[in-house]
Amino acid sequence: MIVAMVGVVLLNCLAVLQVVLAAGAPLGRYAWGGRHDVLPVPLRIASAVSIALYALFALVILQAAGAVDVLPDSAAEVGIWVLAGYFALGVAMNAASRSRPERAVMTPVALALAVVCVVLALR
């Protein structure tokens, strides 16, 4: 359960970042390739959408840990592996970013989330 809570806390932190990015805070160098200090409208919309996705990701993580029982078991079992792959891809994408802040912050976050998902998938 501790592993799942680490994942949920990280997703909540990412959600807060996306909220402030969607609101126009000059932190764009930490996300979406780091090309903009203040995100343009399409990326602000993407940030808002990502908040909803993080909530779904948290639900999958919590179900994989046995903390909730909302999704069909098969959806959670497949979903946690999909998330593991998604976050593993995120490690590569963030590590390849031209933005030093994005590489420094988001690469380890994505790695931690990938590890959380693999640990839960192997339970």
Image (tube, helix red, strand yellow):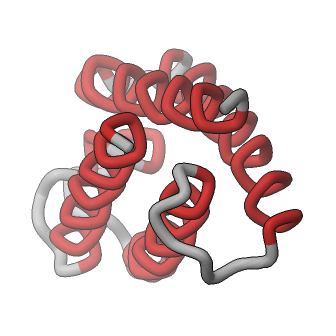
In this rendering, is residue 72 above or below 18? Answer: below
**Left or right of 122, for residue 92:** left
Point out residue 27 in the picture as x, y percentages from the top left corner.
Answer: 16, 52
**Left or right of 1, for residue 78:** right
What is the quadrant of the N terminus in the image? top left
Name which quarter of the figure residue 69 lies in.
bottom right
Name which quarter of the figure residue 57 lies in.
bottom right
Point out residue 70 in the picture as x, y percentages from the top left corner.
Answer: 62, 82
Name which quarter of the figure residue 61 lies in.
bottom right
In this rendering, is residue 82 above or below 49? Answer: above
Outermost residue on the left side: it is 25
Point out residue 25 in the picture as x, y percentages from the top left corner.
Answer: 11, 66
Seen at 67% across and 46% down, the residue is 83
Point out residue 30 in the picture as x, y percentages from the top left corner.
Answer: 28, 41
In this rendering, is residue 95 above or below 42? Answer: above
- Which of the pair 122/51 is nearer the observer? 122
- Which of the pair 40/3 is nearer the observer? 3
Q: Count of labels shown?
A: 0
What is the quadrant of the C terminus in the image? top right
Seen at 62% across and 53% down, the residue is 64
- Which of the pair 33/74 is nearer the observer? 74
